[in-house]
């Protein structure tokens, strides 16, 4: 197996554009790629590759044929979308070329999964992906085709017997969970803001998988306001033990940047530095438990200048084996590009100035009066016994 890493990129993914004023501004993708280039990550060990759009047979691994046809119709005639199948809604307005742009993003994640499984590369990144809310029969939450679920499905199709999916987006990874609800070959783990306070109002700890797949769905519902220490404590109190027990042959991770304290659509208080720390942990866990096979995806993130490009450039650099010093100055050329495109001032450094740390449960036990610890304990009690682990 090669040690090389791949970045899946086609400039046409920026055509995934719901229009002016929509939070899912494709400039976040363009600015991320420009920052990757400014750090020259696209040279050397990281190969930039464009995969083909996902075809119908691939899309049908997750999505119903009638839904794919509905996307095609709305793509050709956006004015005809009336809310059926979730298309033509405020969250998912129809736009010309919607099917093509969505299939292209899906194709990058599927291509990443293929490259990693075949051993062409050890790690592959598609930060345009991570559209985890799309359901088999409908669009949801800014997501048309569920590229994350399609990547997992392709791994299974290629012969993987156990695939783990870890989602650290602020929103519950509901579409991926739904796609594999009754499939014990897939372990889905989602850490997200509590469903009482955030879309999609799912992801309760009691959601643990369907018949025959009990314990295959894992949900950590974090209290609003959770910051670095609590977020990292929750991650490290749930994810490593479950991966060790499940023994995945490949790890797919979703790195929505909307956990950040500046994000306008959610209520967690996580820093860029903690996001970087979790990306490093996912990298290490892939090597520890999945022979290094790691497919890393983007996701949400709506502070499109200050947060998303830096977070996903760190992710890309970690996968490439060229991690960026958080204290480094952001290249001036990128800051100029940010101002040219957005008329906003770019951040100066690749850090929020935080030094994330957390208290391990093994060192101090649980505090039954602490809301974060209550959330973690609820998850462990719900799923750990199904994996032969103590809650």
Image: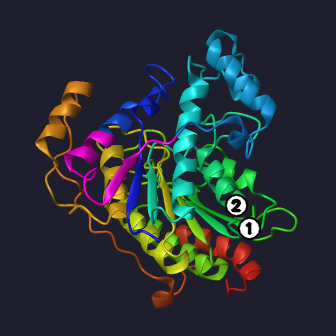
Residue 232 drawn at (x, y percent): 44, 69
Q: Which residue is painted at 56% across and 20% down in the image? A: 97
- Quadrant of the rendered structure where residue 289 is? bottom right
The residue lying furthest to the bottom in this view is: 363
Is residue 170 in view from this perspective?
no
- Quadrant of the rendered structure where residue 273 is? bottom left
Does residue 340 lie above or below 300 as drawn?
A: above
Most foreground residue, 28 or 373? 28
Residue 35 drawn at (x, y percent): 25, 44
Quote the CA–CA distance across marks 1 and 2: 8 Å
Q: Which residue is mark 2?
A: 156
Does residue 123 lie above or below 236 as drawn?
A: above
Most foreground residue, 332 or 268? 332
Q: Which segment is the magenta one?
A: 32-51
Q: Are marks 1 and 2 in contact (CB under 8 Å)?
A: yes
Q: Which residue is painted at 44% across and 22% down in the image? A: 21
The reply, left or right, for residue 178 in relation to residue 167 is right
Q: Secondary structure at mark 1?
A: loop
Q: Which mark is residue 185?
A: 1
Instruction: Let me know if residue 295 is in the magenta part.
Output: no
For the C terminus, the quadrant is bottom right
- Quadrant of the rendered structure where residue 91 is? top right
Mark 1 or mark 2: name the one nearer the start of the chain: 2
Q: Which residue is painted at 58% across and 24% down in the image? A: 98
Badge 2 density bin: few <14, some 14–19, many ≥20, Cα 10 Å: some
């Amino acid at each position: 197996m090669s040690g090389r890493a791949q970045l899946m990129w086609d400039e046409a993914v920026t055509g995934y554009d719901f229009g002016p004023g929509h939070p899912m501004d494709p400039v976040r993708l363009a600015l991320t790629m420009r920052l990757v280039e400014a750090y020259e990550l696209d040279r050397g060990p990281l190969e930039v590759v464009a995969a083909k759009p996902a075809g119908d047979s691939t899309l049908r691994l997750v999505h119903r044929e009638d839904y794919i046809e509905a996307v095609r119709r709305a793509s050709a005639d956006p004015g005809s979308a009336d809310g059926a199948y979730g298309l033509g809604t405020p969250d998912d307005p129809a736009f010309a070329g919607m099917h093509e742009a969505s299939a292209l993003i899906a194709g990058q994640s599927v291509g990443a999964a293929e490259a990693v499984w075949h051993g062409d590369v050890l790690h592959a990144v598609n930060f345009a992906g991570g559209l985890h809310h799309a359901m088999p029969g409908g669009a949801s939450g800014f997501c048309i085709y569920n590229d994350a679920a399609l990547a997992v499905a392709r791994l299974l199709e290629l012969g993987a017997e156990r695939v783990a999916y870890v989602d650290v987006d602020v929103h519950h990874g509901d579409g991926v969970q739904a796609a594999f609800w009754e499939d014990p070959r897939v372990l889905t783990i989602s850490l997200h803001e509590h469903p009482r306070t955030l879309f999609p109002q799912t992801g309760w700890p009691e959601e643990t998988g369907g018949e025959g797949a009990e314990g295959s769905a894992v949900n950590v519902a974090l209290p609003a306001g959770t910051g670095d220490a609590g977020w990292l404590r929750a991650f490290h109190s749930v994810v490593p033990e479950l991966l060790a027990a499940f023994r995945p042959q490949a790890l797919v991770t979703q790195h929505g940047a909307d956990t950040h304290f500046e994000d306008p659509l959610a209520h967690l208080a996580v820093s860029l530095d903690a996001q970087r720390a979790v990306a490093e942990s996912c990298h290490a866990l892939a090597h520890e438990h999945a022979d290094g096979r790691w497919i890393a995806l983007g996701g949400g993130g709506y502070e499109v200048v200050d947060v998303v490009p830096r977070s996903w450039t760190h992710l890309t650099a970690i996968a490439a084996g060229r991690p960026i010093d958080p204290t480094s100055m952001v290249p001036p050329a990128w800051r100029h590009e940010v101002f040219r495109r957005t008329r906003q001032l770019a951040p100066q450094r690749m850090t929020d100035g935080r030094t994330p740390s957390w208290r391990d449960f093994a060192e101090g036990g649980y505090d039954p009066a602490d809301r974060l610890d209550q959330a973690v304990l609820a998850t462990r009690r719900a799923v750990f016994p199904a994996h032969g682990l103590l809650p």
